[in-house]
Amino acid sequence: MKQHNLHRQHFHNRHCSQGFTLVEVMVAVFVLSIGLLGTASLQIIAKKANYDAVQRTTAAMLANDIIERMRTNVDNLADYEVAIASPLTDANAGTEPVQDCSSSASGDVCTPTQLAAHDLWEWQQAIIGATDQSGGNNTGGLAQPAACIIVDTTTDVYTVAIAWLGKTALSNPTGGGAAGYTCGENLDYGASDEYRRIFVISTFIQNTV
């Protein structure tokens, strides 16, 4: 009988050693939860970074687009100077100029002034994403954008600045006081412009006038 009881006790101990205690399960769940929370946080950070990268790429493309338009209309570069006093929206982006300079038929009769006006209108439409719509909503544009074109007729240097609303708070970009970096300041980009993002490019364009 004693030998039988020892055999039963040995089998019971061996069987228990193959399972997990409640403490072990709780620790495992806790560690797993920490890992999942960390992964979720990284995904959020990655999505914000990707969003900012896409917005900056879009701003760079738009800035270069208007510069190329200006290069094809060097007879009236001064008419491209513009500063948007408030974030661009459908309401304040203006209406299309009467003279449509986008088609070759009407482009032949457009004056340099009319061409500049139409270029600026098309540019602003692209900035707010009105040129690419889905379900009646603007897509592909910038978030709360503001735009400035600064013309320096003395040096023939033209600065294009585009500001937009970022996802995370950072220090306000000042650019050391360089031209264009004040574009969009004191608008709806946070109390200290900590959500203001900006892309600035300056280029030389020979004025033929």
Image (cartoon, rainbow, N blue to C red):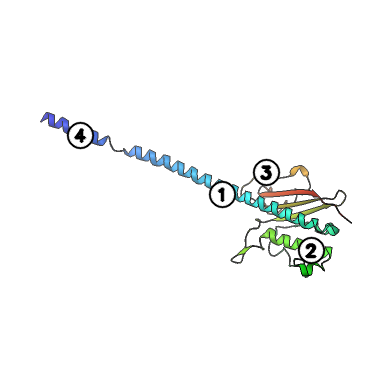
Q: Residue furthest right?
A: 209
The residue pinned by badge 1 equals 47
- Between 49 and 110, the one lying in front of the other is 110
Q: Residues within 10 Å of mark 2 (few under 14, many from 20)?
A: many
Q: Residues within 10 Å of mark 3 (few under 14, many from 20)?
A: few
The residue pinned by badge 3 equals 171
Marks 2/4 in contact by CB < 8 Å: the verdict is no
Q: Disc 4 to disc 3, how far (Cα)?
A: 68 Å
SS type, badge 3: loop
The earlier-in-sequence mark between 4 and 1 is 4
The earlier-in-sequence mark between 3 and 2 is 2
The earlier-in-sequence mark between 4 and 3 is 4
The earlier-in-sequence mark between 1 and 3 is 1
The x and y percentages for residue 103 are 75, 67
The residue pinned by badge 2 equals 117
Mark 1 or 3, which is nearer the eye? 1
- The residue depicted at 24 percent of the width and 33 percent of the height is 14
The residue pinned by badge 4 equals 11
Marks 3/2 in contact by CB < 8 Å: the verdict is no
